[in-house]
Amino acid sequence: MTGFASTREVTKADLAIQFVPSAFQINGTFTLNAKAISNEYFTSDESVLSGGAFTLRLPFALEGGANSIQSMTVTVTNSQGTSAGKMAGKCQ
């Protein structure tokens, strides 16, 4: 996910996963506390050059593989509020 944070901070990221019916998985939302990593990035030289632009990558292993996911939506939150949901793409 790419985004822009005018406040140069991201406090959390929420990942809502909807599995295919045959995957025998439970749909849910997972929250990542992003304060520390956001602060590390937004105080780096790289971030100073890119303004408030960022790329969020959330690698994880999934039993059943990528084909067990029907959809994933990511939102990020900072002191100004929560972003609109963005559909996440699958890596093949």
Image (cartoon, rainbow, N blue to C red):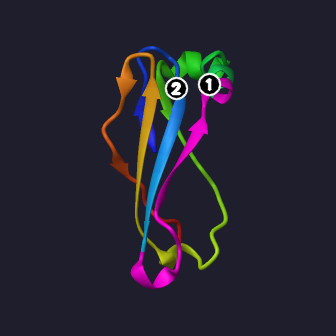
Q: Is residue 18 above or below residue 54?
A: below
Residue 88 vs residue 64, the one in the foreground: 64
On the image, the x and y values in percent for residue 13 come to 51, 38
Residue 74 lies within the magenta run: no
From which residue to which does the magenta span run? 20-37
On the image, the x and y values in percent for residue 49 come to 55, 18
Q: Is residue 27 above or below residue 68?
A: above
> Residue at left 48%, top 58%?
28
User: Going from the N terminus, do you reach mark 2 or mark 1 first?
Assistant: 2
Label 1 Cα neighbours within 10 Å, binned few <14 / some 14-19 / many ≥20: some
Disc 2 to disc 1: CB gap under 8 Å: yes
Residue 8 vs residue 20, the one in the foreground: 20
Label 2 Cα neighbours within 10 Å, binned few <14 / some 14-19 / many ≥20: many
> Residue at left 45%, top 85%?
22
Report the amino acid beneath label 1.
Lys
> Residue at left 65%, top 59%?
60
> Residue at left 46%, top 45%?
1
Asked whether, in this view, residue 56 is left or right of residue 19, the answer is right
The quarter of the picture where residue 3 lies is top left
Q: Secondary structure at mark 1?
A: helix
* Total tally of numbered discs in the picture: 2
Which residue lies under the disc numbered 2? 10
Report the amino acid beneath label 2.
Val
On the image, the x and y values in percent for residue 23 come to 50, 81
Asked whether, in this view, residue 3 is left or right of residue 39, the answer is left
Residue 32 lies within the magenta run: yes
Which residue lies under the disc numbered 1? 35
